[in-house]
Image (cartoon, rainbow, N blue to C red):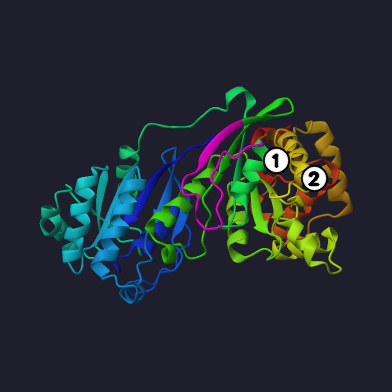
């Protein structure tokens, strides 16, 4: 299982933390605007450099107006943010502004980080001009963090050097091999939907704290257990708020640990309140689980309350409504239960067992190609720019999760809708319920063409 290190990007407002986050992960996830405190949802993503994977955290989100309204000065909010980051991160990236120079808030943040004694990288952002890049050392030397890395997050200059510095400071790998074929299950969802109650019901004892107060669970708690003839590790995680900054830095980093749990699990069990339905937060978590190629089960908790409300709703009706709310995960099984009364609790673990089998399912190459060739003959790819995609053969080189490779004349000719068609064909003929499939298209080698 992957247990990635955590790298937090900290600094005062409007120094370019979100822009740097976007640049380092290679895609635009954080909203960037030239206004202090514009980030509303603090973000997490996995980044990879030189073969090392780590969790990168954008800790922007300090809202001066909101902080003052709650009796907090901007300086206090910045200090709390830096302290929480230093406590939770393995490496801290402190960002300063090369154009405006040293600011009193920079001194405050630096003082906190020095006390925490975390590995540190000082980054002078907005160093687009040669003069700004040349002046950063003298300007920020008194912070005591060594030579700053001069970067331009907007233009990408210097980010390779920054990533090299980060990777050099990462702790030793903490990848864990599953013990005895152990399967890791991460229980994820918004606060107060019944995650801890579900964990306790599955374990048959009160192993984790249950409370009506949202956010009671702050740490991810791993609990081994057996069901049938297989060993499992159940991870009860802190709830993820839609706007973590509204609930304080501690809750934010608890949410980060929840997202890290997704990265190191095999199957994510997404719990939602059946009385409320799927919310934005659940859709986001489902998307993260799929992006990380994890098995996914969607669980509607509090089924007993739905039954008490009466009405004409059936499980089939609710399942259809959930499908409409997460159309990007049509392969995920959906079940409804009550963790409190244990009604339909027995529906969950058989689904887990099936997904465990599907994660490791391998399709023989000959059997796979019979299905793929038949599908291509029935539904050939469209002509693109006067050229036709030709798929010569397919194979499945990997499992857990399954990976399928299609050898073709030109991968650039593969259109999105045809890729989805081929994935649906595989799902129709082979059992991969609950499992995201990876389809790769590679050009056939010259030697194979000659044969």
Query: Which disc number belongs to residue 65?
Result: none
Distance between mark 2 and mark 1 Cα atoms = 10 Å
Q: Which residues are magenta?
A: 204-224
Residue found farthest to the top: 180
Expressed as whole percent of the image width and height from the top left, the position of residue 144 reads: 14, 49
- Residue toward you, 327 or 405: 327
Give the percent coordinates (x, y) of residue 347: 78, 44
Q: Is residue 219 magenta?
A: yes
Relative horizontal placement of residue 86, taking residue 174 as reference (left or right): left
Is 103 placed left or right of 384 in the picture? Answer: left
Q: Is residue 7 above or below residue 182?
A: below
| Quarter where residue 154 is shown | bottom left
Q: Nearer the viewer, residue 117 or 33?
A: 117
In depth, the one of 139 and 330 nearer the eye is 330
Residue 16 found in image quarter: bottom left
Residue at 74%, 55% (x, y): give it: 420
- Name the mark on residue 404: 1
Element marked by disc 2 = helix
Label 2 close to label 1 by CB (< 8 Å) = yes
Is residue 390 visible in this depiction of the protein?
A: yes
Going from N to C along the chain, the mark reached first, 2 or 1, is 1
Q: Is residue 444 visible?
A: no
């Amino acid at each position: 299982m992957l247990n990635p290190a955590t790298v937090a990007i900290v600094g005062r407002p409007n120094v370019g933390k979100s822009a740097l986050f976007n640049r380092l992960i290679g895609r635009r996830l954080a909203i960037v605007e030239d206004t202090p405190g514009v980030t509303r949802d603090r973000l997490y993503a996995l980044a990879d450099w030189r073969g090392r994977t780590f969790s990168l955290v954008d800790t922007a989100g300090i809202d001066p107006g909101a902080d003052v309204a709650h009796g907090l000065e901007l300086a206090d909010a910045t200090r709390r943010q830096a302290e929480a980051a230093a406590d939770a991160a393995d490496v801290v990236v402190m960002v300063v502004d090369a154009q405006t120079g040293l600011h009193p808030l920079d001194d405050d943040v630096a003082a906190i980080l020095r006390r925490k004694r975390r590995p540190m990288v000082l980054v002078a952002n907005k160093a687009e001009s040669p003069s700004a890049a040349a002046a950063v050392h003298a300007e920020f030397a008194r912070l005591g963090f060594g030579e700053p890395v001069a970067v331009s997050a907007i233009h990408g200059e210097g980010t390779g050097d920054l990533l090299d510095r980060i990777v050099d400071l990462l702790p030793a790998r903490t990848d864990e091999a599953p013990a005895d074929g152990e399967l890791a299950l991460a229980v994820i969802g918004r606060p107060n939907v019944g995650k801890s109650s579900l964990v306790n019901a599955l374990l048959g004892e009160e192993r984790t704290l249950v409370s009506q107060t949202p956010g009671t669970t702050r740490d991810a708690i791993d609990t081994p257990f057996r069901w049938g003839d297989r060993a499992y590790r159940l991870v009860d995680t802190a709830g993820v708020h839609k706007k973590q900054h509204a609930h304080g830095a501690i809750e934010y980093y608890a949410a980060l640990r929840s997202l890290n749990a997704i990265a190191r699990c095999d199957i994510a069990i997404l719990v939602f309140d059946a009385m409320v339905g799927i919310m934005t937060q659940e859709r986001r978590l489902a998307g993260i689980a799929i992006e990380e190629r994890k098995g996914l089960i969607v669980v509607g908790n509090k089924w007993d309350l739905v039954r008490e409300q009466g009405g004409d709703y059936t499980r089939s009706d609710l399942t259809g409504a959930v499908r409409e709310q997460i159309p990007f995960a049509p392969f995920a099984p959906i079940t409804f239960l009550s963790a409190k009364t244990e009604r339909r609790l027995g529906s969950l673990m058989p689904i887990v067992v099936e997904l465990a089998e599907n994660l490791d399912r391998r399709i023989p190459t000959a059997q796979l190609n019979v299905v793929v060739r038949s599908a291509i003959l029935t539904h050939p790819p469209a002509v693109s720019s006067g050229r036709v995609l030709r798929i010569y053969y397919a194979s499945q080189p990997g499992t857990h999760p399954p990976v399928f490779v299609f050898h073709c004349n030109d991968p650039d000719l593969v259109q999105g809708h045809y890729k989805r068609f081929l994935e649906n064909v595989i799902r129709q003929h082979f059992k991969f319920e609950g499992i995201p499939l990876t389809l790769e298209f590679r050009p056939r080698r010259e030697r194979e063409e000659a044969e």
